[in-house]
Image (cartoon, rainbow, N blue to C red):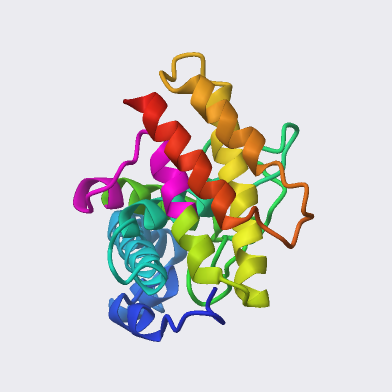
């Protein structure tokens, strides 16, 4: 995604200090290790909030680049954050159950290194960035209007992504990857016995099982028809 959308401004606007930066700023390089550890532990929440801010701003930037009319930008940003910490794969192909948990996809999708830390879920900073993506997901839901709790909201967001992708090979490959994440998200809802929209999530999950291969997403007209069908059922 960093190759498809310029994220330089969002990255520069949200500096993310590391533990080493914390020690340097406090001129504590020569402190004994236990004292350095105490300093870093006391400032851990500040570093977490800076990571959340980075994830939020980057997700918003990507969403607005895809949806400049702001029709479904909130849902797109929310979906990106969810996919980032959850990933795909695992025993059922549904990604991690908790931020930083076990999954098959190792990249903190959809951003590579220097955007969200080292950019890999299995890197030393991977769990911290997965937690930040989880926090950014919550922030998006609180600050940006969107349909975050019904299946049609996510499908409508994906429909906008497909329209943005058009016939561009790189964009469509990225959309196909996003479809795998949407499938994992829907699958988790299917297995949640308390979800009121469980039957509709089953439709989303099944629609995302692509017959077109891993590099081709569903046609935009299929996403549109699914969104209309879901919206009618939700009403």
Side of 137 where 143 appears, left or right: left
Residue 151 drawn above or below residue 222: above
The range drawn in magenta is 140-158
Main SS class of the magenta portion in the image: helix
Whether residue 127 is visible: no
Where residue 116 appears, x then y in whole percent? 48, 68
Side of 89 where 185 appears, left or right: left
Q: Looking at the rendering, in which quadrant would you find the N terminus?
A: bottom right
Where residue 91 appears, x then y in whole percent? 75, 33
Judged from this view, the residue extending furthest toward the top is 193
Number of numbered callouts drawn: 0
Where residue 76 appears, x then y in whole percent? 41, 56
Side of 179 where 22 appears, left or right: left
Viewer-side residue, 14 vs 70:
70
Q: Name the residue: 68% across, 76% down.
A: 169
Viewer-side residue, 33 vs 47:
47
Residue 18 drawn above or below residue 109: below
Whether residue 193 is visible: yes
Where residue 138 appears, x then y in whole percent? 31, 45
Q: Name the residue: 67% across, 44% down.
A: 103
Using the rendered view, name the quadrant where residue 45 is placed.
bottom left
Q: Is residue 34 magenta?
A: no
Viewer-side residue, 87 vs 77:
77
Viewer-side residue, 19 vs 46:
46
Q: Looking at the rendering, in which quadrant would you find the C terminus?
A: top left
Side of 7 where 84 appears, left or right: right
Q: Name the residue: 62% across, 74% down.
A: 167
Residue 15 drawn above or below residue 45: below
């Amino acid at each position: 995604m960093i190759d498809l959308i310029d994220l330089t401004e969002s990255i520069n606007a949200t500096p993310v200090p590391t533990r080493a930066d914390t020690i340097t700023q406090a001129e504590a390089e020569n402190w004994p290790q236990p004292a350095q550890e105490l300093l870093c532990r006391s400032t851990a929440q500040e570093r977490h909030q800076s990571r959340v801010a980075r994830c939020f701003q980057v997700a918003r930037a990507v969403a607005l680049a895809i949806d400049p009319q702001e029709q479904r930008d909130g849902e797109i940003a929310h979906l990106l954050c969810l996919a980032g910490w959850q990933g795909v794969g695992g025993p059922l192909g549904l990604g991690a159950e908790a931020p930083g948990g076990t999954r098959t996809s190792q990249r903190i999708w959809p951003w590579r290194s220097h955007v969200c830390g080292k950019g890999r879920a299995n890197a030393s900073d991977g769990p911290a960035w997965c937690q930040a993506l989880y926090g950014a997901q919550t922030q998006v839901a609180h600050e940006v209007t969107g349909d975050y709790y019904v299946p049609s909201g996510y499908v409508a967001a994906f429909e906008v992504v497909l329209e943005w992708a058009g016939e561009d090979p790189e964009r469509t490959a990225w959309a196909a990857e996003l479809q795998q994440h949407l499938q994992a998200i829907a699958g988790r809802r299917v297995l949640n016995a308390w979800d009121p929209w469980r039957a509709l999530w089953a439709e989303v999950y099944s629609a995302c099982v692509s017959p077109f291969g891993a590099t081709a997403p569903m046609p935009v007209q299929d996403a549109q028809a699914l969104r209309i069908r879901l919206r009618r059922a939700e009403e």
